[in-house]
Image (tube, helix red, strand yellow):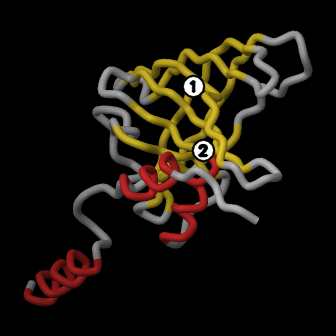
Amino acid sequence: MRGLHSLWAILLSLGLIGAPSLAQAQLSESPITPGFWSFANRKSETTQDVRAACRNYIEIRFADGHYIGLRIYKTESGVAVREVGEVGRCTFNRETQVEHCDKRLIKPDGSIMLGTTESRYSFGDGKTLKMTVTPKMVTDTPFTNAPFDAFPVHCPDDVVWSILNEVGRSR
């Protein structure tokens, strides 16, 4: 009996039994909370990876699910440009564990593509947030609605301020 108690204590300390892992846990709300976000196409390993993702695209999420996505790039002369690339609203359904987003994609030429996405969230390696996105865009140009994976990262306020406040560098 004493050996069974010891085995139980070892298994608990190793985390082999007990609370379910995050990958199996049911979400009660979207993990994309109000604030600044970016959605990398690969897992961010370092702080520099997070900063790099945020330098290309920032999504500003509001508490009611509305969002604005900003594309960020530099012109040949080095001037920093920020463009609204997407607007929409997302709602999370806790029963289906799916986040549904109505969106308008605004292309650099000014044309607009309407549609929706459905996202499912999971946690890789116990902590890395991963979303599988299925787009359903309405368009008359070739566009793939194939599912893809993205890795959301929360952009630190100081990084966002620096990006939005940047005017460019002289060459």
Mark 2 vs mark 1, CA separation in Å: 20 Å
- Relative placement, left or right, of 20 versus 60 is left
- Between disc 2 and disc 1, the foreground one is 2
Where is residue 7? Give x, y as percent.
Answer: 21, 84
User: Residue at coordinates 50% horizontally, 46% vertically from top-left?
Assistant: 164
If the image is split into quadrants, where does the N terminus sit?
bottom left
Where is residue 100? Give x, y as percent.
Answer: 50, 21
Residue 154 in sight: no
If the image is split into quadrants, where does the C terminus sit?
bottom right
Where is residue 80? Give x, y as percent.
Answer: 65, 48
User: Residue at coordinates 48% horizontally, 65% vertically from top-left?
Assistant: 125
Where is residue 159? Give x, y as percent.
Answer: 44, 57
User: Residue at coordinates 71% horizontally, 34% vertically from top-left?
Assistant: 147
Give the residue furthest to the front.
170
Residue 28 in sight: yes
Q: Which residue position holds label 1?
A: 118
Q: Which residue position holds label 2?
A: 57
Query: Could you classify mark 1 by the number of other residues whose Cα lies within 10 Å: few (under 14), some (14-19), or many (20 or more)?
Result: some
Name the residue type under label 2.
Tyr
Name the residue type under label 1.
Glu
Q: Is residue 76 above or below residue 112?
A: below
In front: 42, or 22?
42
In front: 93, or 67?
67
Ranked by sequence position, the earlier of labels 2 and 1 is 2
- Whether tag 2 and tag 1 are in contact, CB under 8 A, the answer is no
- Relative placement, left or right, of 165 versus 70 is left
Query: Could you classify mark 2 by the number of other residues whose Cα lies within 10 Å: few (under 14), some (14-19), or many (20 or more)?
Result: many
- Relative placement, left or right, of 157 versus 133 is left
User: Residue at coordinates 39% horizontally, 48% vertically from top-left?
Assistant: 24
Q: Is residue 34 above or below residue 1?
A: above
Q: Secondary structure at mark 1?
A: strand
